[in-house]
Amino acid sequence: MFVKKLAFCFTQALPVALGVAILILATPSRAAAQAKYAGIGPGTYVQLGSTFSTYQIDYGQRYLSGAAVFVDAHLYRRIGAEAEVRTFRLNESAGVHETTYLIGPRFSFLAGRLRPYGKLLIGRGEFYYPFNYAKGSYFAIAPGGGVDWHIRQSKLTIRIVDVEIQNWPGFSFGALKPYGFSSGIAVRVF
């Protein structure tokens, strides 16, 4: 019940968050008179974010949507780590839904304000079978990538797109291979 309320709140808050982001982008930023030294990159930082996801879960050709929260820790220039919790409960039928808990390395390609990245996450996927007959926990691996857009002179980052192709090799009825995309927003906290 809590997850349904959280998903409903997220779907109501997403248009507001995107509206605020567009408003921030439309306002002029202050001009900087000094340039950073050529050898200095973005350095170490941590950002917290939330996304809205749509996936084909590969169980009866179902498309489910849901919310996710993530933490990106950029440890050294382009090398970092990402952890995410993603739950798919919107558009569910017969009670079929899933939740994933994933963590792993992330490699960013510095390209100004647009930051493409690749990642390889591993962890656990929980699958809820039809009509609440059972719940299974499985090993999951998820290679993926995407593009973040850092808003200049701000702590906000817009996750334009994040794509994952998951693989649950030990699923009860053969390997499950959900795939999909996400978009969202993050704030730099450190």
Image (cartoon, rainbow, N blue to C red):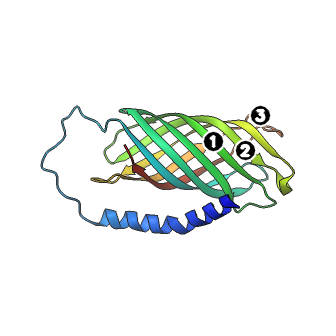
Residue holding disc 3: 170
Residue holding disc 2: 126
Element type where label 1 sits in the image: strand
Q: Quadrant of residue 96?
A: bottom right
Q: Do callouts 2 and 1 mark residues in contact (Cβ within 8 Å)?
A: yes
Q: Quadrant of the N terminus?
A: bottom right
Q: Do callouts 3 and 1 mark residues in contact (Cβ within 8 Å)?
A: no
* Category of crowding for the residue at label 2, using alpha-carbon neighbours closer than 10 angstroms: few (below 14), some (14–19), many (at least 20): some
Task: Give the x, y percent position of residue 89.
Answer: 69, 58
Q: Earlier in the sequence, mark 3 or mark 1?
A: 1
In front: mark 2 or mark 3?
2
Element type where label 2 sits in the image: strand
Residue 30 lies, with reference to residue 128, above or below; the image says below
Task: Give the x, y percent position of residue 29.
Answer: 23, 60
Task: Give the x, y percent position of residue 168.
Answer: 71, 37
Q: Quadrant of the C terminus?
A: top left
Task: Find the residue positioned furthest to the left.
Answer: 33
State the separation of the CA atoms marked 2 and 1. 8 Å
Identity, as a three-letter code, of the amino acid under mark 3: Gly
Which residue lies at the image location 44% right of the left edge and 64% below the top edge? 18
Residue holding disc 1: 101
Which residue lies at the image location 12% right of the left edge and 49% below the top edge? 33
State the separation of the CA atoms marked 3 and 1. 16 Å
Which residue lies at the image location 40% right of the left edge and 32% below the top edge? 75
User: Along the horizontal axis of the image, is 61 left or right of 179?
Assistant: right
* Category of crowding for the residue at label 3, using alpha-carbon neighbours closer than 10 angstroms: few (below 14), some (14–19), many (at least 20): few
Which residue lies at the image location 44% right of the left edge and 38% below the top edge? 73
Task: Give the x, y percent position of residue 62.
Answer: 74, 56
Identity, as a three-letter code, of the amino acid under mark 1: Tyr
Residue 143 lies, with reference to residue 99, above or below; the image says above
In front: mark 3 or mark 1?
1
Q: Earlier in the sequence, mark 2 or mark 1?
A: 1
